[in-house]
Image (cartoon, grey):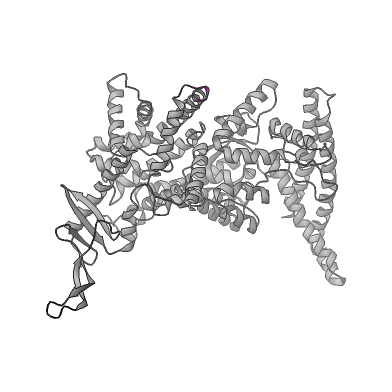
Amino acid sequence: MDVNESLIRRRKNEVAQALLSMVTDHPNPSLWEVFTDDSPDTQRTPIRVTDPETGQKRIEVREQPVNMAGNDRYFKAKRAGRNYYIKLHDERLMNAMRNVGPENNNTLIRAAGAVTRAMSSLVTSYNPEFMLTNFSRDVQTALLNLSAEQTRDDGKIKGEQVVRQTARDIKPAMFAAWRGLNGKEGKDAKQREWNQWFEEFQEDGAKTGYFDMKDIEGQAKEIQSMVRRADGTTLSHMLKARKKTTDFVENMNGAVENAVRLSAYANARRAGVSRKKAASLAKNMTVNFNRRGEAGTALNAAYMFANASIQGTMNFARTMVTVKDTPKGKSPMNVWSRMNLAQKLGLGMATGSFMLGMLNRWLSEEDEDGVLFYDKIPDYEKERSLVLMTGWMGGDDEDYIKIPLPYGYNVFSVVGTHAEAVAAGSEEVTEAAKNLVLAVAGSFSPIGFEDSDEAHSLFLKNLTPTIFRSITQIGVNENFSGRPIYREDFPFGTPTPDSSRSFRSTPEAYKGFASFLNEFSGGTDNISGEIDVSPDVMQHLVNYYGGGAWGFVEKTADYAKRMATGEEVDRYRVPFAGRFMGSVTEYGDMQRFYERRDELGQIANEAESLRGMERVNYRRGNQKKLRLFNRATHIEKRLRELRKQRDRVEATETLPDEAKERRIDMLEKQMQRWVDDFNRRYNQLE
């Protein structure tokens, strides 16, 4: 700890010396002043003196030296063994300089920050799948930002041509980062050269670190944990095994996270850029997790990745907001000639997404309700990824692949995708505008953004701090995208136990444990016990707080079990590959059925409340909708009957598993046909 504190003091003094040089090179008494022990600052101070003639005591105001060493109004720098005291007259600048290094926060922020930091690590560093999507987004973001830096008027590598070679060198850079993080030597001259680049990359501070820095107290706890792992007990061996596993996953993610940065750093250095400027370029070409403002740690404690979102927004603004000076011989109105390369690529992304939407519309088949499968892909999927329908390649008609888009820059793709939908007549202009606003909010809001059709749910989900957000989501029964978390009971009829209701995709482990708790606490299949919890709620809580790391373990175990028993595996539930595959599910159709039933039900209620000719005219104007509501009521009753049959089949122990699966599949297809029939009739009303 003494060594770390010494290092922190030394690095703080380096910052102080840089500030001292700036202040002395640009003297401005209205902004700052510099004092020393030999030439201290003074202030008028009342002191008690004795009159030499009368001997009486009196108070006089005199200029007196200030005790600068222990005064927060002065920023201390040490150069060549001499102390300098910098007095900054701007209080905001002084506050920023005082906060150089890890902050000292109160107990509540430290506790919340520790939980949020652990959750962020489970989502990212300890999640093997994260490196795939993160790599895809990182490469796109880095190359776009790098393109801007070499074509902007004030670019860090203006005039250099390093983007193409940076892309080519990502692979050797990734292996070099992996070797460096694991302390391994290179086998040949080329690998040793890249290892040397990585060493200098680290020395210059270009390597990105964790999502938050540990203070001295946090580092002390880490050392205590290292001591426990070295004491030779059974617990220590278990701790070592856990540490090796987490270090392996973390170093894989670290190698992926730093690959494109290292490649850019090395190519900038080869182009003659200074080490300092190359390090700044690499550090800030995507999200610099180690940079934050005064409120950075407190904000991150409340909202996971808030600081990362702010840093990403600042990078996006630098790349996309300003244009270059007017080139010689060009008109100022020729905006295209004033754009940097990244801005032109952004417009190209919007155009490409428009054309991709047209291609998907041509490739996509229609569902039974007359709607293209492409139009049924959730908006949040199209917002975050490039989508391509794959049914024409021999798979199921509802299947598609997706390529993750970089945050911020995905807005260009959203513009193109929804512009095509409006042009094709599958989406209203107002709906497209809403989706664009949601995409902008989701990309740039530091607290994240979760969708909902209900205003109060939208408000509650987005303002709730990360630690408690899952509780709010359960309360409104909506996940981040607005889809239901658990199956609700039917609004009419006798309530069923929460433990007896679940989605078909819910792993059997959760269903079995929920049923066990209900029966253990006095319940049955039809009666709620003292502990009656939905399996879907259990899964949501475990996945939310366990993050991607637990989700990966659960998904892998469920995949292995289903493959062994011959059960069907949803595409998105396949480990690793599921990050790039999707499929339109029947849950969206079912959700639309109930939403539309409620809409038509309100029209029916309005008709019932009217009297006389007003009622006659209203019913005449909404005749088709009222008829469709009656059909919806009939279909809802039929769906309840089919679900009861399905539940009885699932509960029976006399049928073989294969026969049971066939019977359940047949019943669910019947339910889907009823829903498709209703949705097709509803679409024909419009």
The main secondary structure of the magenta stretch is loop
Residue 68: quadrant of the picture: bottom left
**Residue 230: percent from the left, percent from the top?**
44, 25
Q: Quadrant of the C terminus?
A: bottom right
Residue at far left of view: 53
Residue 588: quadrant of the picture: top right
583 sits left or right of 186 in the view: right
Q: Is residue 654 above or below residue 61?
A: above
591 sits left or right of 554 in the view: right
Q: In the rendered structure, which segment of residues is drawn in magenta?
A: 231-235
Residue 5: quadrant of the picture: top left
Q: Is residue 359 above or below residue 69?
A: above
Q: Is residue 438 magenta?
A: no
Between 160 and 547, the one nearer to me in the picture: 547
Residue at far top of view: 187
Residue at far bottom of view: 54
Between 464 and 254, the one nearer to me in the picture: 464
Between 305 and 11, the one nearer to me in the picture: 11
Q: Residue at x 71, y 48 (%)?
A: 592
535 sits left or right of 345 in the view: right
Q: Quadrant of the N terminus?
A: top left
**Residue 452: percent from the left, percent from the top?**
63, 53
Q: Is residue 234 magenta?
A: yes
**Residue 662: percent from the left, percent from the top?**
78, 27
491 sits left or right of 28 in the view: right
**Residue 266: percent from the left, percent from the top?**
29, 34
> In this figure, what is the number of numbered marks?
0
Q: Residue at x 52, y 49 (%)?
A: 414
Q: Is residue 58 above or below residue 104?
A: below
Q: Residue at x 81, y 22 (%)?
A: 656
